Each structure stands twice: as structure tokens, then as C-alpha cells.
Amino acid sequence: MKNKDKLLTIGQFASMHGINKKTLMWYDETGLFKPAAVNPENGYRCYSYHQSPILETILLLRELGVSIHEIQAFMQNRSAASLKSLLEEKITDLDTQLTHLQAVRATLCTHRQNMETLLSIDLSGISIVEKEERCLVTVDIDQNTSFEQEVELITAETEKYHLGRLHKASYGSMISVASLQCGRFDDYSRLFIEIPFLPYQAGLHLTPGGKYLRAFHKGAWDGIPKRYQEILAYAKEHGLKLHGYSYEMGINENVIDQIGDYIVQIEIPVAE
């Protein structure tokens, strides 16, 4: 670019950086970014091309959500070290936001998949599906665990993993195949929380990848034992060996008003 030392009008300089000239006027008034010169006759602000890197740094920091006060402090002690420190802090913040957004997206995709399932499922049908392994946070329960205690257990785990909001994860219950085969259809032993992008670590429950028997139950909880009897009969008829746990999860809580419309998705691993 020729004539880099030539002064630019506030409009020209603002256009070059894709901002409104009122922004430059505000930066001047706050002392954050002063013009290279001010015409003494008319008070017009003029800027130098050589000021562009400084302005672009300010605009970048503003885009990252850095406050004017923070930027002013940086500008008063501008150096490679101070900029590196400030950018590292904001990169960490961005990484946290990205992780949050990825988790929200994964939750939205789960809800969308549930709605697609609702629109196409045969509630009386039983099918075989392929699933990838996944990590679950689990809490132990038994027949004596009250609903209030279950809520407390789930709340403690959500706080432990800094979920903040319930919608950031999926929830369900687990009952062992051994209990089902013995006719103990109320012998639930765990509640699970599926948190998007949770890496495996000691203490988590790892569900097996592979084939799963999938079925659905619509209505009140007291009808689930009958559904399990149908599932076990189906597995026996088709020579399927079930193992591990049955994973139950409600898939339509956000679109119903009464328990009679509640749909539980049941998935049980099938041995290869």
C-alpha cells in the first residue's frame, strides 16, 4: 500500500476496519484509542495507517468479550508478555464456552432423535439396533430408596460434574438382566446420567458397544413388568442372549401432559 504515512479521515479509517466511525469517536472519548491528529480548524479526527494493528488488537479483544477496563489496563502496559497472558486467559474461556456449546448441541441432537423416534416408532414392536459404547455416571439405589433420595443423589452428581441445568444431560434407570430373568421387575439397582463428551475415568459405568434389543413402553410404570415379559419371550424365541443391564430412559417428557402418554425406551445389550 502506497503513502502509508498519509493521514486518513475517521470515515476512511473506520471503513478500512469494518466498523462504525462512532466506535472510533467513543474509543477516543474513553481514552482507549486516540486519533493520530486532530484538525485544529474543524476538530476532525485523523488516523494513521500505522495505528491499524493497535486498533485490530482492540477489536479482537472486544470480540472476545474483554471489557473496556481490561483493555485500558493492557494498553497502559502493552507488551508481548501482557498480550500473551491476556490471550491465554481468553482462549481458556473460549474453550470452556465451546465445550458448553458442544454439550448443548449434543443434547439438542438427542432430543431431535427422540422426536424422530416418536414420529416413526411402532410401540408394540421390538427391534435390534447397533449402539456405540458410552460412559455413564451412575448412583446406586434399591427398593427402599425414596423418590426424594433419588432426587438428592442425582442433584449431587449434577453438581459434581458442574452441569448446572438438568437439560445438559440425559437420565434413566438400570435394572440387571439377572433380576429380569428371575422375575424381579422392580429390582432397580442404579440411576444413570449420560453427559455428552464425558471421557472414561475410574468410577464411571461403560456400556458395551454392539447390538441392543430395543423396545418401548407407553403408560404408567406398573405396566413395565408386562413389557419385560414380552421382551424376554421375544429374546427366547429368537435365540438372543441378553446380558448386563437394561437401560430405561423417558423420551417424550417435554411433549406430554399426563403419565398415560409417557414413553420409556428400553435397551438391553445382546451377546454376539
Image: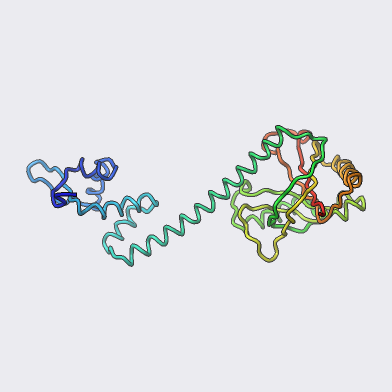
Q: Nearer the viewer, residue 216 or 214?
A: 214
Q: Nearer the viewer, residue 259 or 174?
A: 174
Percent of width and height locating residue 142: 82, 56
Residue at image position (79%, 40%) is 216
Residue at image position (27%, 44%) is 23
Percent of width and height locating residue 233: 91, 44
Residue at image position (81%, 56%) is 244
Residue 35 to residue 220: above or below: below
Q: How is the image coloured?
A: rainbow
Report the quarter where the C terminus lies: bottom right
Q: Residue furthest front?
A: 272
Q: Is residue 174 visible?
A: yes
Percent of width and height locating residue 242: 85, 52
In the figure, is residue 157 to the left or right of 237? Answer: left
Residue at image position (21%, 53%) is 51
Q: Nearer the viewer, residue 183 or 121?
A: 121
